[in-house]
Amino acid sequence: MKGGINEGLRLCELQYGSYCIWHEENREDMKDSMVKKLKDQLFVARAYYPSVAKIPAQNTLTRDLKQNIQELERVLSESTTDADLPPEIQKKSERMEATIAKSKSVTMDCHNVDKKLRQIFDLTEDEANFHMKQSAFLYQLAVQTMPKSQHCLSMRLTVEYFRDDSFDQELPVKYSDPTLQHYVIFSTNVIASTVVINSTVMHARVCLFQDSMNQVFHVLTNGQNYYAMKHWFLGNTFKDAVVEVLNIDPFIPDYYDKTTPSHLNLPTEFRVSFHGINNASAMHSRTQYISIFSHSHYLLPEIFKNLEKVVVLDDDIVVQQDLSTLWSLNMGQKVMGAIQICSVRLGQVRSYLGESSFHKNSCTWMSGLNVIDLARWRKLGISETYWKLVKEQVSKEGSTALASLLTFQDLIYALDNDWVLSGLGHDYGLSTQSIKKAAVLHYNGNMKPWLELGIPKYKVYWRKFLNPENQFLNECNVNP
């Protein structure tokens, strides 16, 4: 039976993604057992009634069966929980049980009973499928919608920005100094980007030229969130690190045509589901959640014209160790350092890549923690290659992700897997040991740590980098 449940979960995940994992992990023990029992009795009684009613000698049983069905229908129309049931419900259930037992003892055409049961079962299955689709839709809506508390925070900060312009602590000289460590974060989420910066700064190595004085963070956001971000980061300090907030809208180039949205694009997350083989006789389904660069990432050389190297951090990560060694990496002729996902190779998504030229055994790669050699990026014309591929792939589903995978083919420097532990936004099975060992935790998947739907046991690693005493967080009920 357990194997059947696991197979059902896998099939559900192939269709509905991480909703099924969340639903299984948050399944509650069955309540209102009497209501369920009454519904089951009603289900069986309705199946027997048509066949019993056709037997002239069973008029009394037919009348009793009809009466019991009507009684339970009336009770269930007024009751949805056991607490709603009338005091005499136990006797009604016993009478129905006895009537069903009599019906089972009557000689009749079993084909008719079976046919009726199948009809009722089909109706019930259709209703269950409807509720599954409805629940999956509401789950997706919940993970894609900004929580009310964060909307409040953004509005409050925007209002305060225009109300109080008494401080301006920006240090533009540092923003373009190539000798410093420059981190780039694409985000529209104030608290998410705060956690990334705070956790990075808190773990910076305290020694000459390798502490937070050397760190510059560039938060790239859109016009809608720019003033909220600006006010927040001007009003909060992160040791000696410098934070620049940039509105990306003015940087959007002319080649954003009708097929490419002319606004900030956050890293693209997509789900890859496919079948594999455990052994000669066993098939199994597998689902991977991969995050990858979006359109906006290909503006980096244009935005940071004076920089030759940056580290790009997604806003759904938490840093647990010092990142300074990334700046001394020798990536050879490669353009980007990234975690490679060799459990998903380009050949396994070839149906999406069409006739494009690619190496089928090449590993896919993840955004989250990426070391970018901007000088080599410019020399090889990476952005131009990407936009050309986007236009070629525009009619295909997931064209952005596919264009990114092809653009960086053979140009990825594989970071050690110990750098990043992925899956905290969808995988309930990660061990505490592996979490503590990782330099960076990546909450890729739908269940982000700032959402109610986030995986509770992983939220503790994220929450500790927010200040619970902050006035704005308290006023907007952003409870870390």
Image: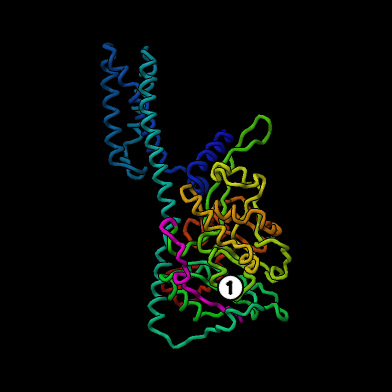
Disc 1 is placed on an element classified as helix
Q: Nearer the viewer, residue 360 or 429?
A: 360
Magenta part of the chain: 238-259
Can residue 312 be seen at all in this image of the molecule? yes
Query: Which residue is tagged 1?
Result: 198
Quarter of the picture containing the N terminus is: top right
User: For this view, does 416 lie left or right of residue 23?
Assistant: right
136 over 371 or under it: above or below: above
Q: Nearer the viewer, residue 124 or 137?
A: 137
Residue 103 at x, y percent in the picture: 35, 19
The residue at 67%/54% (across/down) is 410
35 over 239 or under it: above or below: above
179 over 310 or under it: above or below: below
User: For this view, does 407 lie left or right of residue 330?
Assistant: left
Amino acid type indicated by mark 1: Asn
Residue furthest bottom in the image: 166
Residue 265 at x, y percent in the picture: 48, 62
Q: How many callouts does the rendering have?
A: 1
- Is-magenta flag for residue 98? no
Residue 381 at x, y percent in the picture: 60, 62
The residue at 59%/66% (across/down) is 312
The residue at 26%/26% (across/down) is 67
Residue 326 at x, y percent in the picture: 69, 68
User: Quadrant of residue 228 in the image?
Assistant: bottom left
Can residue 344 be seen at all in this image of the molecule? no
32 over 140 or under it: above or below: above
Q: Nearer the viewer, residue 99 or 16?
A: 16
The residue at 60%/42% (across/down) is 348
